[in-house]
C-alpha cells in the first residue's frame, strides 16, 4: 500500500479513509480511518480516528480507537481513547477518558 500524505499547507474539511498509511502534516476537520496514522508536529485532526497504529507529534481533538497509540513529546491530545497499548513521552499533553488494554 502507498502512503498518503496531507502536506502542511493543506486543510481538509471532511473524512479521510485509506486502507494504507496516512501521514498528516496539515489539518483534517473530519474523521480519519486508516491502517496507520502519523500526525506530524504541524498536523491537526479535529475528528475521530480509527486505526491499527497511531503516532502523533501534533494536535488531536476527537475520539481515538486504535490497537496501538504513541504520543510524542510535542503532541497535544484531547480525546476519549480505546486502545490495547498507550505510550506517552514525557512532555506530551493528554486530556480525556481512556480505556487501555481493551
Image (cartoon, helix red, strand yellow):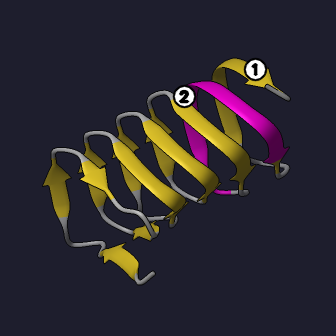
Give the magenta-colored segment's residue range.
Answer: 74-87
Outermost bottom residue: 2
**Sequence-earlier tag: 1 or 2:** 2
Query: Image height check: is 32 above or below 9?
Result: above
Please name the residue that numbered disc 1 is placed on. Answer: 99
Q: Where is residue 90 in the image (x, y as percent from the top left)?
A: 85, 49
Name the image quarter holding the N terminus: bottom left
**Magenta-colored stretch includes residue 83:** yes
- Quarter-of-image position of residue 61: top left
- Quarter-of-image position of residue 80: top right
Please name the residue that numbered disc 2 is placed on. Answer: 78
- Quarter-of-image position of residue 95: top right
Q: In this view, does 23 lie to the left or right of 74?
A: left
Outermost top residue: 97
Residues 71 and 68: in front is: 68
Q: How crowded is mark 2: few (under 14 residues within 10 Å), some or many (20 or more)?
A: some
Name the image quarter holding the C terminus: top right
**Magenta-colored stretch includes residue 2:** no
Question: What main secondary structure does the magenta stretch of the protein show?
Answer: strand
Residue for point 77% across, 48% down: 91
Residue for point 73% across, 57% down: 73
Q: Is residue 1 left or right of residue 16?
A: right
Helix, strand or loop for disc 1: strand
Query: Image height check: is 26 above or below 5?
Result: above
Helix, strand or loop for disc 2: strand
Residues 18 and 37: in front is: 18
Q: Nearer the viewer, mark 1 or mark 2?
A: 1
Circles 1 and 2 in contact, beta carbons < 8 Å = no
Query: Image height check: is 36 above or below 84?
Result: below
Q: Where is residue 56 in the image (x, y as percent from the top left)?
A: 60, 56
Q: Position of residue 42 (x, y in %)?
A: 42, 64
Q: Residues within 10 Å of mark 1 (few under 14, many from 20)?
A: few
Amino acid at each position: 500500500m502507498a502512503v498518503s500524505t496531507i502536506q502542511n499547507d493543506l486543510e481538509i474539511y471532511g473524512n479521510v479513509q485509506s486502507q494504507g498509511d496516512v501521514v498528516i502534516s496539515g489539518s483534517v476537520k473530519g474523521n480519519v480511518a486508516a491502517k496507520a496514522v502519523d500526525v506530524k508536529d504541524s498536523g491537526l485532526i479535529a475528528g475521530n480516528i480509527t486505526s491499527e497504529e497511531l503516532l502523533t507529534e501534533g494536535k488531536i481533538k476527537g475520539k481515538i480507537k486504535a490497537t496501538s497509540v504513541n504520543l510524542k513529546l510535542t503532541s497535544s491530545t484531547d480525546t476519549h481513547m480505546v486502545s490495547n497499548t498507550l505510550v506517552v513521552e514525557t512532555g506530551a499533553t493528554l486530556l480525556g477518558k481512556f480505556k487501555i488494554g481493551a
